[in-house]
Amino acid sequence: MTLVLLRTFVGVSALFTPRLAARIFGVDPDSSSAWVTRLFGSRELALAGVLLVATPEHLPTVAALGAAIDTADVVSSLVEVRRGTVSTYTLISGGAGAAVFAALGFDIARRARTLNP
């Protein structure tokens, strides 16, 4: 449930207040596209929604898929820091946040598999 709430918070803030969300993640809201931020928000809300309604049988797959997406976000963050296109603050706020989401998702998947082998 924690991951659902976190994803919902991030999704709603990115979708409905994209300039504020960009600032929170350390991205210049004037040079970034509100459209891209809103796409990110839609994705987070979709991931929260499917996690919330997943049956016990499907929960491991749904949680692992979200964690895989978050892992890709971590890798993307690291690549962009190395290229110098995002700041260390952005790496911490966005990349580390994605790492937390990935860890929570993989943990949910592992526990759900244990409960429903």
Image (cartoon, grey):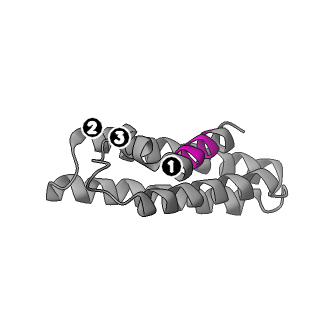
* Magenta residue check for 12: yes
Q: Residues within 10 Å of mark 2 (few under 14, many from 20)?
A: some
Q: CA distance from mark 3 to mark 2?
A: 11 Å
Circle nearer the viewer, 1 or 2: 1
Name the N-terminal-most of marks 3 and 2. Answer: 3
Q: Which residues are magenta?
A: 6-14
Q: Return the residue found at the far left.
A: 84
* Magenta residue check for 8: yes
Towards the viewer: 36 or 66:
36
Position of residue 34 measured from the top left corner of the image (x, y, whole percent): 41, 57
Position of residue 10 measured from the top left corner of the image (x, y, whole percent): 54, 44
Name the residue: 24% across, 57% down: 80
Name the residue: 64% across, 45% down: 8
Identify residue for label 1.
14
Position of residue 54 measured from the top left corner of the image (x, y, whole percent): 80, 58
Identify residue for label 2.
89
Towards the viewer: 63 or 92:
92
69 with respect to 76 (left or right): right
